[in-house]
Image (tube, rainbow, N blue to C red):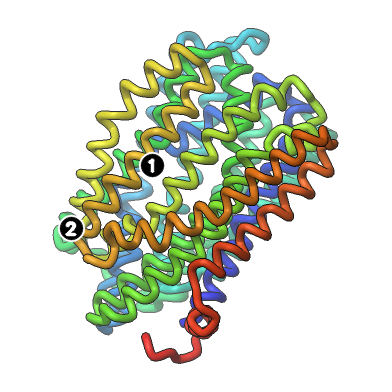
Amino acid sequence: MRLARNMAVAMANSVVLVLINLIALPFYLRFLGMEAYGLIGFYATLQTVLQVLDVGLAPTLSREIAHGAETGQQRRSASLLRTLEVVYVAVAIVIAVFVLLTAPWIGDYWLQAKTLPTETVTQAVMLMGINLACRWPISLYHGGLIGAHRLAHSSATSIVINVCAAVTTIAVLAWGMRSIQVFFVVQAVFGLLQVIVLRVLVRRVLGERDAPYDFGDLKRVWHFSAWAGGVAIAGLLLSQFDKVVLSRIVSLESFAHYMLATLLVSGLQILTRPAFNTLYPKFSALIARGDTASLEYLYDSATKLFATALFALAFGVVFQTKPLVMLWLGNAKVAEDVAPVAAWLAIGSALNGVMYFPYSLQLAAGQPKLAFATAAGLLVVIIPAVLLLAMRFGILGGALGWALVNLLYVVAGTWLTGRKVMVFAGWSWLQRNVTVPALATFIPALIGAWICSMLAVGPWTALGTGSIAALIGIALGVAGSFAPSEFRRVVAMAFGRPTSAQ
């Protein structure tokens, strides 16, 4: 299997999705206004929060398909997919009904709209429910393609449909009806289309189209799925608690600023999601094969490369947010409000991104209980922290809470993974493979920001300086983490050429 190819197509998908959101945002603000964009941000939060209803079934399917390919049990995997399809359709109906029933209460009492009529907000929330139901099975089919090492299929579908959805939405808003209701209708249509295409692809890849439904087989995977679902619930609460709290206590306009900062930081997902989607099935396959030596080598070398690129990108956001927003939206006031929030969100997200490696290893080793215990412990910290900080500092407090809880996550999660899963994933991994890239990329970024501040340069020059600093940081990170011969060996492994570690 070519890890480089899978990572490349997954990264292409992430890059396109981030670019779509960044390019489309000015049009949405122009045609709909800041408060309407706040509703879009609330929809994104609601969509993420409701992923708790997945109860770990998508990652369970990924693991089962990856194991089935190694053990010759693809028919059982196909049967599990058919069974889970029924479950997902039922959950989609529940989601739609729940959101439709609660929409009046959300519009009247939860969201703090000032200019949008309450009726408009309520209708938008109702359409969110329809949209969520249409898109709900995407994660199931995406998980199936991940387990089958078919990221190219899933990524290509996502790219094409999301580009078409964005272009169609902008065109309808520009030349048709300019309303938030229209936005959600168009998004629902393309979401349903993506479900249909992904379903065809995953069933074609697995074959065994006559595989029977087997609800009894759910008992076999339920233990893993239940704990993975617990992890998902706790993880979603961790990542969305700040947004849920802020959507209630700040104005819809301020919440929109927070979601703007979140959108900027989502650029880090260019690396994090592809890394998880590529490495999780590979870790699962190596553990099923009992190849601990290759697992350790892949874990260490992939972390060093990933952490170097991730921290370089994150520190670029930390130090260059203000000029970026100025060039993006041309609004100095918005740039001033968003910059510090985005900086702290970027720090927290970079720390969270590094922990995808321990998390992937825990799931691949069949120990979701450990991941759940870690996430549950972090929840005890983040709930009071975000509440206090958000009430005291508003949207900046929400970002500070996110950064603090992820710092704790890095410390506690690394220690637990080294003690309970694999020794090589403990403190030595954090010191060698995370700390060195972080320092190597932080120093050039800091120097670049200091130069820009001293010379009072314009936004274009600031971004150029930040880009150069990031490239220098990447070079220093690679040089500090790999000997030349080892780096060539890692490149060979990524492109599928045999190495001694394999």
Q: CA distance from mark 2 to mark 1?
A: 30 Å
Point 79% across, 25% down: residue: 331
Viewer-nearest residue: 57 or 469? 469
Specify which label sits upstream in the sequence, 2 or 1.
1
8 left or right of 335?
Answer: left
When asked about the image quadrant of residue 225, the answer is bottom left
Residue 221 on image: x %, y %: 19, 60
Which one is closest to the eye, mark 2 or mark 1?
2
Q: Secondary structure at mark 2?
A: helix
The residue indicated by pointer 2 is: 419
Point 32% across, 75% down: residue: 295
- Assess disc 2: are there few (<14), some (14-19) or many (≥20) residues with their C-alpha within 10 Å of its C-alpha: some
Rendered position, 412 above or below 126: below
Q: Where, quadrant-wise, is the C terminus in this rendering?
A: bottom left
164 left or right of 55?
Answer: right
Q: Secondary structure at mark 1?
A: helix
Residue 277 on image: x %, y %: 45, 63
Q: Which mark is residue 282?
A: none
Amino acid identity at mark 2: Arg
Point 83% across, 42% down: residue: 460
Viewer-nearest residue: 453 or 317? 453
The residue indicated by pointer 1 is: 51
Residue 204 on image: x %, y %: 46, 74
Rendered position, 133 above or below 123: below
Amino acid identity at mark 1: Gln
Point 57% across, 13% down: residue: 251
Residue 256 in sight from this viewpoint: yes
